[in-house]
Image: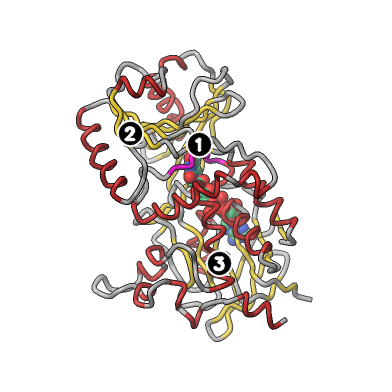
Amino acid sequence: MPDKADAVIIGGGVMGCAIAYNLAKEGLNPVVIEKSDIGGEASGSNGGGVRQSARNLKEMPLAMESIRIYGQLHEELGMDVEYVRAGNMRLCTSEEELATMSQSVDNQKAVGLELEMLDRKQVLEINPYVGEKVIGASFCPTDGHVNPFLTTYGFFKNAKAHGARFYTHETVKKIQLKKGRVTAVVTDKNRFETDLVVNAAGIKGRDVANMVGLDLAMRPIFSEAMITEALPPLFKQMVGHAKGLFYGRQTMHGSFFWGGFVGTEQFIYRDGKPLFHYIGPAISRMVIDYFPVLKDLNVIRTWSGLIAGMSDGIPVLGVTEEVPGFIFATGFSGHGFGLAPVIGRLISQLIMDCQTQISISDFCYSRFHEGADRECACKKNGACTTLTAVCPNKRQWLKTI
Ligand SMILES: Cc1cc2nc3c(=O)[nH]c(=O)nc-3n(C[C@H](O)[C@H](O)[C@H](O)COP(=O)(O)OP(=O)(O)OC[C@H]3O[C@@H](n4cnc5c(N)ncnc54)[C@H](O)[C@@H]3O)c2cc1C
């Protein structure tokens, strides 16, 4: 006997859990299928950076709203997610970096972000531990960081409390269509009848799109991270390299998280074979260079993760004309964790009411598949959400049952 679900969400990362939570709160009966553990992929391996700064400007309205939600998430989820809003500092060591950063700061301020350039003296007033080579920085005071495990767990726990069902260690193999519309999701253990599928499969978002004959300009990007032993509190900001080569923070319990891409050009391949374990030392060397105070700290664990990198660096969100009932929430390109609370809300709003509080038309699937001289189908209609033929409109549907 096939199971039934109002919506099947593929992927139990932070996005799948946040979407399930918001949908279940609205009265739907969503099912989340996760092939490993909840938060077992990118959502459990990331740095927890929650930033608006240094994003593609198209994402800025989403990031700003997400930061607002993060500010009250502990109340909404009924648990501490270790959210710290103490700023994000991107450190510059040359005039060239300062000039590039300055230009970027101006662009971001023009879309309403509170952001400033600091000279070395101002940097030291906020963070006295930066090394001598740092001559300035950008600083966004409303950025911050969060504990990614607690946040993902918080959405999961609350989604369950509102009636969402989770199936872990179960893999979606197939999405069935009838006359082009979604009718069921087949896993290695079950079959779920549904007219709505959300692709929240992270790095596997492309494979899931392929299941319904769609494709995404997505590729995996390797990223390594590490955690050190703990020290008493030194600083609260998220800090990072001007060009993003490394980034990190001190966690609530005192360990330092560091991640990045530094050194990958020199070290990642030898004779065509990847040498991943060289990246950790390369990040460490750079961190010590920028924060000499940490030079004797032991690294206690390193790991790697894959980023769902879109060719244009921004996610794919919303419905598509090609396959009614198929909704994208994937391709967050290495900075999705900061967006999770707002994505949960927007995808839920889209499913329930066919409109979102912030336009998601810049993120539509058809941006990749229409001629450059043609307007995106979503934009033609004002917003993705007005594609009425494929609009789920679940609130109307709920009234009829
Ligand atoms: C090392 C690293 C550091 C990062 N640092 C930051 C940061 O500081 N700040 C920030 O904002 N972002 C950061 N990110 C990015 C961030 O982690 C992601 O954007 C975010 O977690 C994406 O969440 P998700 O739910 O879309 O994907 P995931 O967490 O990857 O979840 C997708 C889930 O789908 C499941 N799945 C896939 N296919 C199937 C299938 N067929 N059937 C069932 N389940 C399936 C997977 O098992 C997975 O659990 C970082 C990423 C990495 C790797």
Which residue is under mark 3? 349
The alpha-carbon separation of the residues under discs 3 and 1 comes to 27 Å
Q: Is mark 1 within 8 Å of ligand 1?
A: no
Q: In the picture provided, is 363 more to the left or to the right than 231?
A: left
Per the image, label 1 sits on a secondary structure element best described as loop
The three-letter code of the residue at mark 1 reads Arg
Residue 213 got which mark?
A: none
Q: Nearer the viewer, residue 142 or 191?
A: 142
Q: Which one is in front, 238 or 32?
A: 238
Q: Would you name the residue on which mark 1 appears?
A: 85
On the image, the x and y values in percent for residue 135 come to 27, 23
Residue 22 image point, x, y percent: 63, 60
Determine if the magenta segment contains residue 47: yes
Could you tell me the amino acid type at mark 3? Gln
Residue at 49%, 30% in the rendered image: 249
Q: Which residues are magenta?
A: 45-51
Residue 199 lies, with reference to residue 304, above or below; the image says below
Q: Position of residue 353 (x, y in %)?
A: 56, 73
